[in-house]
Image (cartoon, helix red, strand yellow):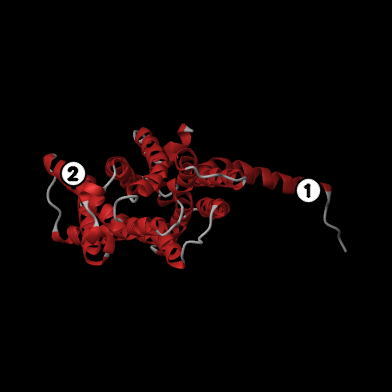
Amino acid sequence: MSFIFRRIIPSGKQVPLIAALLIVYFVWGTTYHALNVAMQTMPPLLMNGARFLLAGAVMLGLARWKGLAWPSLEQWRHSALIGGLMAFGAMGLVVLAQKMGIGSGLMATVVTTMPMWLALWTRWGGEHVPATSWLGLVLGVAGAAVLALEGDFSATWLGALFAFGAPLCWSLGSYASRKLSLPGPAMASAAQWLTGGAIGLLVAVLFEPATHTWQIGQTSVASWGAWGYLVVMGTLVTLNAYLWLLKNSSAALASSYSFVNPVVALWVGVALGGEVLTGQVFIALPLILLALALIVYGQPLWRRLGPPLSRLGRRIQRLTRTRHPAAHP
């Protein structure tokens, strides 16, 4: 495995790469259930906006403590755009979709369409996307489609629209973060979450009816605990790992977490949420693992195995021509 990671990322960063991948693979798979628990006694948009506003404030304090300079006006604008797309747009649509009845496991399967969108923006932006990554993305979406048979979109058409709009917003924000001028990683995270959270709170106060009637004393201990987990693990830890991956690995590898998250989310739903799995999971799981293998290992393996396979193919062709010479008129 080590030679594969040496091909993907420079020497000295293999351990951070693996650690970041494990964090986004497993922690984000548990956050869908945490969202459901938090929303039991908290308004969705208010809960989500406060989550990112607090995480952004903490990151801002850490960034300033480290001596990082304030973002420029242009960097604040770029951060507001990315934060609006990811923290408010994508995550706001996720909580609204789940509040409208989209199951946590099913919501996670819908998010697997995100890498396909991101690969599309990457290709349109002029970057090369390897054929093995495209194949992996297609297989990943196929696995997600099979997993989606575990539930349905019977809640409302609006909930389904929100569910599919979330990965679209996330992919646009992810691509923008790779292209726009931003401050250093810690300050960039702070600015994006702070602005995204502020937008979410403003929208909640203006347009969310549940926010107007919510009372802090009516919030359950379980909801507070889930919200705290979302702030610390789901945002401060995992989003930083994801943003690091976006800057230090390929777009396909950084987005490959979305193929693992549904599996984690479904198993968490079984263990903690009382959900029941059918045989569809055992069909989808090999597809998802194969997709992940193609995205992570496909291009390095092809670079290593491609030339020998090509030479073998040419030798077979020569032997075939020798044993079966072409007929002459």
Residue indicated by mark 1: 320
Which type of secondary structure does the marked residue at label 2 adopt? helix
Q: Residue at x 24, y 64 (%)?
A: 203
Q: Which residue sits at x=60%, y=43%?
A: 282
Q: Position of residue 11 (x, y in %)?
A: 36, 35
Q: Nearer the viewer, mark 1 or mark 2?
A: 2
**Residue depicted at 55% across the width and 44% down the height:** 276
Of the two numbered discs 1 and 2 on the same chain, state the one appearing first in sequence.
2
Closest to the observer: 274 or 167? 274
Crowding at dot 2, Cα within 10 Å, few <14 / some 14-19 / many 20+, comes out as some
The answer to whether residue 46 is visible is: yes
- Whether residue 110 sits left or right of residue 213 in the image: it is right
Using a 10 Å C-alpha cutoff, classify the residue at mark 1 as few (fewer than 14 neighbours), some (14 to 19) or many (20 or more): few
Residue 80 in sight here: no
Residue closer to the observer: 210 or 64? 210
57 to 170, vertically: above or below: above
Residues at discs 1 and 2 in contact (Cβ within 8 Å): no
The numbered dot on residue 120 is: none
Spot occupied by residue 186 in the image (x, y as percentages of width and height) = 22, 45
- Nearest the viewer among 255 and 201 is 201
Mark 2: which amino acid?
A: Val
Q: Is disc 1 placed on a helix, strand or loop?
A: helix
Measure the alpha-carbon separation of dots 1 and 2.
68 Å
Tell me which corner region of the image, top left, top right, bottom left or bottom right, holds residue 61: top left
Q: Whole-percent x and y of residue 80?
A: 22, 60
Mark 1: which amino acid?
Thr
Residue drawn 27% across the image and 52% down it: 47
The quarter of the rendered structure image containing the C terminus is bottom right
x%, y% of residue 158? 42, 67
Residue at which label 2 appears: 58
